[in-house]
Image (spheres, grey):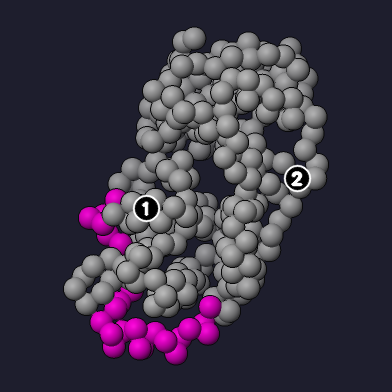
Amino acid sequence: MILKKLDSVEQYNNLTREVRKECRRPYSNLYYTAEQIQRYIDLGRAFFYNAEGGVIFLFDEENYYKVGLYLNGERQFDFPSVDKKLLIRNVYKEGKKEAVLANIENKLIEIGFVKQATTAQVVAQVPQVYEKSRNVERYVSKMEKNGFYCGTVDETQMFEAEQMLLDSKIIKDYHIDYRTESEKNTIPGTYMGIWNKDGKLCAVSIVPIINGIAHGIGIAVREEYKMCGLAPILTYYRFQWLQEHSVELIQAWLLLSNEKSILYHSSLGYIITDKRADEWIKEY
């Protein structure tokens, strides 16, 4: 079970081409562009494993490996032993899970993967959400009079912002992709927060902008500041910022089990699409 480093996009294409020679329609959960593959290669974070029936790609996200499958779904396959947890996200249309995916999932269970959750993709037009979020404007001046202020999180507090999200239990560590400090600072505003008069970070929102599209990860408020209206105010500032920077579309994945979150996003104008993603985890 040898894990090899991926050296080039050409090598990636050759590996997938070899699988197609044997299987005309292999199962794949790979949705990366050549540019995204090249980024992982440049960072030295792209690996592959020649599995029985195909090839498995592993992308190192620091806390976990994101797994890309390119396999003959009718054949048995094995997995390499690694030193981090493995995340597999299988995307499908609601009510239309194909037999090959069901077969893959049965094999994942045999290998030791456990399904953690099912998420739904939601999308929204930024101008529409901004207009709906403006109903809190009357509370902003009150918040500021109480010593709170909103702004972008600089590099000195980015780790703290991420930890706040993880501590909130809203998201898991495998929901935060690895980004270099340079990437985090490429577009100010990816990390936004609200501070109190003493400079303590009280609420955070992380929304990376990739290829002009905002990707919502989550918003979290420290326990002692909940029920103070900080979350909707931060949402207002977030969409004001996106509007000012000509970002027109935002998308996210929400837990189907989190009905409050689904209802809240719907109230802001998000559309619940028919895209679903099952998240499978294997601990090392």
The residue lying toward the viewer, choosing from 102 and 69, is 102
Which one is earlier in the sequence, the residue at label 1 or at label 2?
Answer: 2
- Snapshot quadrant of residue 79: top right
Q: Position of residue 77 (x, y in %)?
A: 63, 15
- The residue lying furthest to the left in this view is 198
- Snapshot quadrant of residue 202: bottom left
Q: Amino acid at mark 1?
A: Asp
**Which residue is at 43% across, 33% downward?**
64
The residue lying toward the viewer, choosing from 114 and 179, is 114
**Which residue is at 57% across, 40% downward?**
116
- Which residue is under mark 1? 167
Dot 1 lies on which element? helix
Badge 1: residue crowd in 10 Å (few <14, some 14–19, many ≥20): some
Name the quadrant of the C terminus: top left
Query: Which secondary structure class fits the magenta region best?
Result: helix
The residue lying toward the viewer, choosing from 169 and 91, is 169
Q: Is residue 220 left or right of residue 153?
A: right
Q: Is residue 168 left or right of residue 148?
A: right
Using the rendered image of the protein, determine whether residue 126 is visible from the camera's viewpoint: yes
- Which residue is under mark 2? 93
Question: Which stretch is magenta?
Answer: 133-159
Q: Position of residue 264 (x, y in %)?
A: 59, 69
Q: Amino acid at mark 2?
A: Lys
